[in-house]
Amino acid sequence: MWVALYSKKIHLHKRVMKLCFCCMAFISILGVQGSEWSASIPASVSGLSGLCIYIPCNFSYPGPRQPAGKLTGIWFQGSTNFQIYNSMNSEVVNALYLNRTRLVGSLARNECSLKIGPLRSSDAKIYTFRIEIPDLDKYSYLQQSTTVSIIDAPSAPSMQCPGILAEGIAVSLVCAVVHSCPEAAPALHWSSIRAEQTIAQPQSRRLLQNGWEERVVLNLLPSSGSHGEVLRCSAVFPSGLSQFGPECRLVVDYAPKNVTVNVSSPLDSVLEGNTVILSCQADSHPAPHTFSWFQWAAGREQLLTAQRGHELYINKIIREPGQYWCQAENTMGIAHSQPLLLDVLYQPEIMNESCCSVISEQELELNCVCIAHGNPKPSINWTFMHSHEPINGQVDSSQSGGHKAVVSLNTSVLWNSTAKELVILCMAENSLSSTTKAFTLTLNTTLNAFVLSDTGPTLGLWGPMMGLTAITMLLPQWHCGLLIESPYLLIESLSSACKLSLRLCDL
């Protein structure tokens, strides 16, 4: 009994396996296409008048896959009677679309994309695809109809504007434009910008749901010169028409550069004793958050910690203030300026080393030296008191330099017997002011001698004397009946550089 039951079970199992195999074979035959009529077609497409348009299309049908010769693909407008394309019979195609429509792809691969071109304004209609399979069925994909619209101007390219860039760090930018006719695809171009390096990759194309996209990638290595530059992409169509995308103003962060120090106050010349304001300027993004000031004085560098802003205040500027420079810092780095040497102007000052000496008493020959400092460097002139004419003689200014003027005078003086004194003036003058120093030769009748003296600087050319600084005596030879051949007695003035001689006569 158990053997009989077991035999029946084996027999039943074989029948089930055979049935399953048959079912799988049938399913494999039908499963190539699926069991539904369906199509993938965009709801709408648009094209440029005068060019072409592609309507992307893929379809499926129930039953086994059929060869192309057994498939008839039809596109119609409105109703099946208005056919604009027929893969088997072009005679039924409406005359308005004859030779203007073409199937793109193969019906055997379930491809039903349609090209229409050149487009006319009358082509703005609703279109439907239909498939006819002999001995199987016919089907119109009415639920997947598409609407064609005609545009007069092409689409403008688009570009994603980047955020904040950093100098020296590469970035890739993409420009793209969508169109409907690959045979008349636009050429994309980038505007010219300043950058360390720009490389535009070859233009590429990809198929979208409602057309084609042209795209070009720009590899950009931004620099400080790229900051604020306007980048733009344009699409040039075969007709010559150009469309421009939106402007993109680049923002690039970079470390300070071209750091400079300038005098912001006073606006004109810097005078001794003025308050001076220096300004530190830097080309950077973002703007510097910290400024540091330095001074080179007394042979060493000094950090001026009291002032950290972009301006430095200097009270009562001196003649030789030394050099100043600044340092600017932002989130990207640090840079410093070149040193600034201030040109401080000051009035002329005649130095105490200035002097006169008598080098020959027989002809009353004088040798005078006038030394003056000033900025601008002063000019020096020798004149007699109460006379505007210069003193004739040999003048030497070869030792002048910088802000120092040195002028020596060698001259012979004709003494007026009725005069009691002779005043020689050294006048130093620049664009700010003038000052004088007087050297006086006086006849002392009591001592029967000449007294040579010099005075300090005066307030003006003919201003009052400031004080007596040195005296020397010399007896004129015409008052001496008998000369004593004694050696010269040297009497020093305030400066050892100038020595005055004295010869005595027997009284």
Image: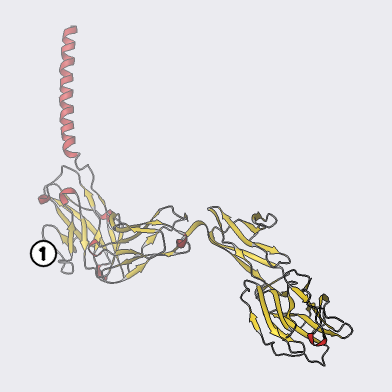
Image location (x, y in percent) of residue 282: 56, 62
Q: Nearer the viewer, residue 455 or 430?
A: 455
| Quarter of image, res 377 | bottom right
| Quarter of image, res 399 | bottom right
Q: Nearer the viewer, residue 380 or 213?
A: 380
Q: Is residue 105 left or right of residue 337?
A: left
According to the picture, the residue beneath numbered tag 1 turns out to be 91
The residue that appears at 77% across and 87% down in the rendered structure is 385
In the image, residue 416 sits, relative to residue 105, either above or below, namely below
Q: Colour scheme used in the picture?
A: secondary structure
What kind of element bears circle 1? helix
Image location (x, y in percent) of residue 269: 66, 74
Q: Is residue 395 left or right of residue 192?
A: right
Q: Specify whether residue 461 is in view.
A: no
Question: In which quadrant of the rendered image does the C terminus lie?
Answer: bottom right
In the image, residue 293 sits, relative to residue 486, either above or below, namely above
Q: Is residue 245 left or right of residue 119?
A: right
| Quarter of image, res 440 | bottom right
- Amino acid tagged 1: Glu
Q: Specify whether residue 500 is in view.
A: yes
Image location (x, y in percent) of residue 89: 10, 60
